[in-house]
Image: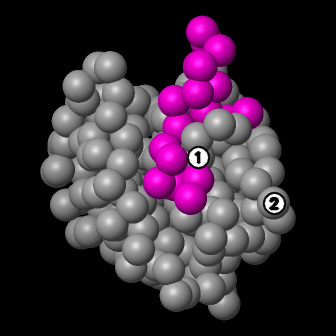
Amino acid sequence: MKVLALTDNHGRRITIEEGELDLIVISGDITQFGGYDEAREVIEPIVRLGIRLLAVPGNCDYPGVGKYLDEIRANCDGRIISVDNLTFAGLGGSNPTPCNTPNEFPEEDLTDKLTRFSNRDISVLITHPPPFNTLVDRTASGGHAGSKAVRNFIESAKPNLVLCGHIHEAGGEDWIGLTRIINPGPGPGVIIDL
């Protein structure tokens, strides 16, 4: 399965280059503090192409984003969705930030949300926040801003792959044990073969 992983486009229209894709995954911040209408405007080009989409809202997305994702059957936030024998689970929003954005949750709430996936064999975890203390959560000042709840879940559930975002300057790849973690960063995204 050929997957295009995107994140943090913050309201920029998504344009897909020619090529065969089976799935597009967006790890949040689809809008720049927008809701339903902005999400529809950003994602509509994908819908028109007929490519399967899975996404979670980010910390800068208002509740209308989730409603639009529900409408197009792409919302993976708090859900498990199977695609071609792979199990995807999603966690939207983020751990607290200094910016007081609309879709932030205490780490305890993120832990509670992830608990529903604990006894499942997760192939791919789609989250907006990266796991704490990794190469993909390092801020420009050198600190780590990822989620401890996400990291703890990865260490216990051991999904094969985590697709995340949130920390724009930390695009790249890292590993926690045998779990590959990819933050595609804002931009054209990363193609992954699953």
Q: Residue shown at 16%/51% (left/top)?
A: 64
Q: Residue shown at 17%/50% (left/top)?
A: 63
Magenta stretch holds residue 136: yes
Identify the element where label 2 is drawn: loop
Viewer-closest of 81 and 42 = 81
Residue 83, picture quadrant: bottom right
Q: Residues within 10 Å of mark 2 (few under 14, many from 20)?
A: few
The picture places residue 121, in percent across and down from the top left corner, at: 62, 85
Q: Residues within 10 Å of mark 1 (few under 14, many from 20)?
A: many
Q: Which residue in the protein does label 2 denote?
A: 177
Q: Is residue 151 above or below residue 58?
A: below
Viewer-closest of 132 and 28 = 132
Name the kind of residue labelled 1 in the image.
Pro
In the drawing, does residue 191 fall left or right of residue 84?
right
Q: Which mark is residue 131?
A: 1
* Magenta part of the chain: 135-152
Q: What quarter of the picture does the N terminus occupy?
A: bottom right
Q: Residue shown at 27%/46% (left/top)?
A: 105
The picture places residue 20, in percent across and down from the top left corner, at: 74, 63
Q: Residue shown at 47%/54% (left/top)?
A: 149
